[in-house]
Amino acid sequence: MSTKQEQFIGEPLNQEQTPDSEAPQVTSSGILLEVHPSRAELYEELHNRPSPLVKTPCCVTHIALLVAREQRADEYQHLVQLCQRFSINPPAEGASCFYQNFGGFELRWESHMEFSTYTFICSGSDPESFITQPYTGRALQYVPRDWLQKLPGQSMAAVHLAMAKSSESMTQEHLDNAFEQMRLSGSQVAGNKAEVFTSFRIHSDGFSRALVIDKGLNSYQAGRLMQRVLEIETYRIMALLSLPIARKLSPQVQKMEEKLASINNSIASLNEDIDENSMLIELSELAAKIEQYRSDTNYRFGATTAYYDIVNARLKQLHEKEMHGYQTLQEFIGRRLGPGIKTCAAVKERMESLSLRIAQTSSLLRTRVELSIEAQNQALLTSMNHRSGMQLRLQQTVEGLSVAAIAYYLMGLLEYIYDAVEHQGIHIDKTTALGISVPFAVLITWAAMRKMMRSIKGAESKVK
């Protein structure tokens, strides 16, 4: 088993390496640089999905299918089955495009981020039939019907494109019949080398239709023009995929905007009776809902913008010139597709603005709640200070009464002492002695109380 070797620019190929090996070498004498593993892939990216070389007259059928991620494997296997029926080598697994001539028709398969396209090209031999009957499904006549019906995914765009040589026998009646009397958009393109007509509608066969009149295109120009017309049809439909979502969300967003406005009015009224907590709960619910909407639609609206940019780019590449009696493709799409895209952009912008305003209102309401709590705390501190003052005065009063009570009981003890002294035969004027002892008893009691209070406060300060 061979192992993958590190690749260097300037390293010559050995006998075991070939230009088609997994790590192709780039040789240049005297240079030896390590190659990034994605270098070759990035070089090839610019050459992926080349325009076809088309000879007119021809019929083209183009189908774009919305393919889910879990359907990708089935899609590949379905493509392999078609190749096996015609003994054609299938594409490599994981390939993003596949171009192959199947004999009676040419198939161009391309896989995009969320959809895949199948383009069937069939060259014609009867130029006159392309004028009288351009949309007979000729491009699909050699494609197995059972295989077509089992294509994985949901059809988003389906187009029959006829490319015919310019002919004087082409009349307005032919155009009307080909497009089932529907109103057409048309213009001269590619430096007046071709004319393009389309109705931008679904016809009776379930396909939309486009007609290119070749007035001097070479095969490369015809292929580029075919590709642009098909991409315009595909991407304009994909761009509108978010329009039903935007229309569904718009009333919901409006209700949320009205709810937020009501909350803001309540806050602005400076009504002290409002329940801030209930408002915060309502704001949290609004914020959660709008963020859910945004996360659910962010990809879809972003894809709409990208697809619309591609449509505009392809329209500019047509270099349209007006034809008498017809509206150009760019004018039609600008007038009809533009408002739908703006609707999607407006809903997206409204949701972003609403999310920001909900956050601002929540911040404002929290500030109001914090100020209210701070005011309550200040009032509580003031009340506590008042109570502390009252307690201090009460304590001082109690201390005074305690000194008096203790001094009173101390005088009672002194009276017993004086009685005991007189009983021993020592004459003392007890009344005078008690009177003289009162100030000393009060002073001693007060000093003892003060010392005790200081010791208690000192112990409390040490604990803190």
Image (cartoon, grey):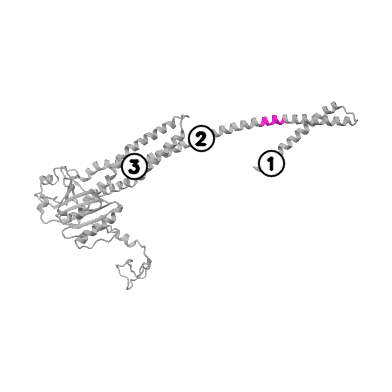
Please, what is the three-letter code of the amino acid marked with disc 2? Leu
What amino acid is found at the position of numbered circle 1 in the picture?
Ala
In the rendered image, which quarter contains the C terminus? top right
Which kind of residue does numbered mark 3 sit on?
A: Lys
- First along the sequence among labels 3 and 2: 3
For the residues labelled 3 and 2, say whether their Cβ atoms are less than 8 Å apart: no
Residue shown at 74%/37% (left/top)? 451
SS of the residue under disc 1: helix
Location of mark 3 (residue):
348
Taking the view exactly as shown, the residue that stands out farthest to the left is: 169
Q: In the rendered view, does 315 fall on the left or right side of 175?
A: right
The image shows residue 224 at horizontal and vertical percentages of: 21, 54
Q: Is residue 225 visible?
A: no
Residues packed near mark 2 inside 10 Å, few (<14), some (14 to 19) or many (20 plus): few
Residue 304 in view here = yes
Residue 68 inside the magenta-drawn segment: no
Residue reaching furthest to the right = 425
Marks 3/2: CA–CA distance: 35 Å
Query: Which callout, 2 or 1, points at the residue further toward the start of the chain?
Result: 2
All told, the count of numbered labels is 3
Extent of the magenta region: 392-400
Residue 459 marker = 1
Of tags 2 and 1, which is closer to the observer? 1
> Badge 2 is on which residue?
371
65 to the left or right of 411: left
